[in-house]
Amino acid sequence: MWERGPSRSLRPDRPRVSLARALSKLGYGSRTQALDWIEEGRVRVNGLVETNGARRVDPAKDRVEVEGRGGNSGMTRVRVFRSSPFA
C-alpha cells in the first residue's frame, strides 16, 4: 500500500513562504499591498529585484528589502497602557 509522507506545511526542511506573506509577517503591510510593491519592482530579495509575487522565500535566511529598508527596520511596536478608575 502507498504511504503518504508528511504534509508540506509540517516539513522542517521547507519553511518557505510566499514573498507577499513574508512582507506581511515582517510588518510592512497587507499581502495585497505587498503584491503591488512586488509588481512595481520595489522589492529586493538577496539584493536582486523581484517581480514574482509567488516566489518562495525563507524569512530567516533570505534578505528581503522594500525600497532599501531591510527586515522590519523602521517599524516599532508601541504598547499603550491605560489606567481606568473602574478596574
Image: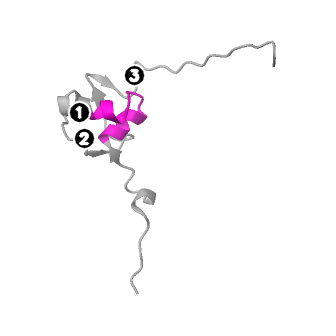
Q: Earlier in the sequence, mark 1 or mark 2?
A: 1
- Taking depth in this image into account, of 53 and 6 the one nearest to the observer is 53
Instruction: Please give the name of the residue rendered at 32% of the width and 38% of the height, measured from the top-left corner.
Output: 20
Is the residue under label 1 in contact with that under label 3 (CB below 8 Å)? no
Q: Nearer the viewer, mark 2 or mark 3?
A: 2
- Taking depth in this image into account, of 15 and 24 the one nearest to the observer is 24
Q: Residues within 10 Å of mark 1 (few under 14, many from 20)?
A: many
Figure quadrant of residue 53? top left
Q: Circle 2 sits on which residue?
A: 53
Q: Is residue 44 above or below residue 61?
A: above
Q: Is residue 29 above or below residue 14?
A: above
Answer whether residue 30 is magenta in the image.
yes
CA gap between label 3 and label 1 equals 18 Å
Quadrant where the N terminus sits is bottom left
Is residue 12 visible in this depiction of the protein? no
**Percent position (x, y) of residue 27?**
42, 29
Q: Earlier in the sequence, mark 2 or mark 3?
A: 2
Is residue 56 visible in this depiction of the protein? yes
Disc marking residue 73: 3
Q: Nearer the viewer, mark 3 or mark 1?
A: 1
| Start-end of magenta stretch | 19-35
